[in-house]
Amino acid sequence: MSNLAVRLVAASVLAVAAMAATAQPVEIEGVKFEPTAQVGGTTLQLNGAGLRTRAIFKVYVAGLYVPQKANDAAALLAQKGARRVAITMLRNVDAETFAGALNDGLRDNHTEAQFNSLKPQIDALNANLKAVGEAKKGAVILFEFIPGTGTRVMEGGQPRGTVIPGEDFFTAVLRIWIGDKPVDGSLKKGLVGG
């Protein structure tokens, strides 16, 4: 075998090993995030995952699934198409507290005018979270955007509440975690793959 052939074989082995390494599930606090997810018939890539803490409490872990991986929040927010934020609760949180925290995240990452323009969609999101009820430890809550349909909240594999129209609304929700004023800076770093 020539020197060039040996180098090509070695490069191929390294490339396959690198792809296999990136296709492994990510585990945080005992919760596994698979490397891909299906949303609305589209295969999404796990961009990153992280832990949400509040004071000293571990609240939930979250994973961000997108069409194209990126290590920049602005690039992730600019993406179009199907997307998912997968949350697994690490403690019980009542619906009102959970909805309030998301509303605070929306308010912090939008001007007052932007926030007010989203009010009907935010009200629908709050109603969907109330349909989930108490987010119990171990519960898996999905925030998904499906093109042509809208944003849906899933819990326990079942849709909760109504589908909320508008791709801009899902992007607004995504800013809760990866916007300029995220609910948790270390969670944002994990979600953007940093």
Image (cartoon, grey):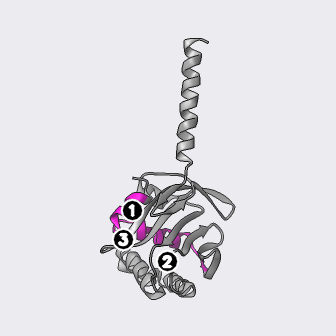
Residue 52: x, y in percent?
Answer: 39, 69
Say what secondary structure mark 1 lies in: helix
What type of secondary structure mainly makes up the magenta span? helix
- Separation of residues labelled 1 and 3 (CA atoms): 12 Å
Q: Which residue is mark 2?
A: 137
Residue 72: x, y in percent?
Answer: 41, 54
Q: Are marks 2 and 1 in contact (CB under 8 Å)?
A: no
Q: Which residue is mark 3?
A: 53
Residue that lies at the very extreme toward the right in this rendered image: 41
How packed mark 1 is, by other alpha carbons closer than 10 Å (few <14, some 14-19, many 20 or more), is many
Q: What amino acid does circle 2 point to?
A: Lys
Mark yes or no: residue 183 visible.
no
Residue that lies at the very extreme toward the top in this rendered image: 2
Mark yes or no: residue 64 visible.
yes
Q: What amino acid does circle 3 point to?
A: Thr
Q: What amino acid does circle 1 point to?
A: Lys
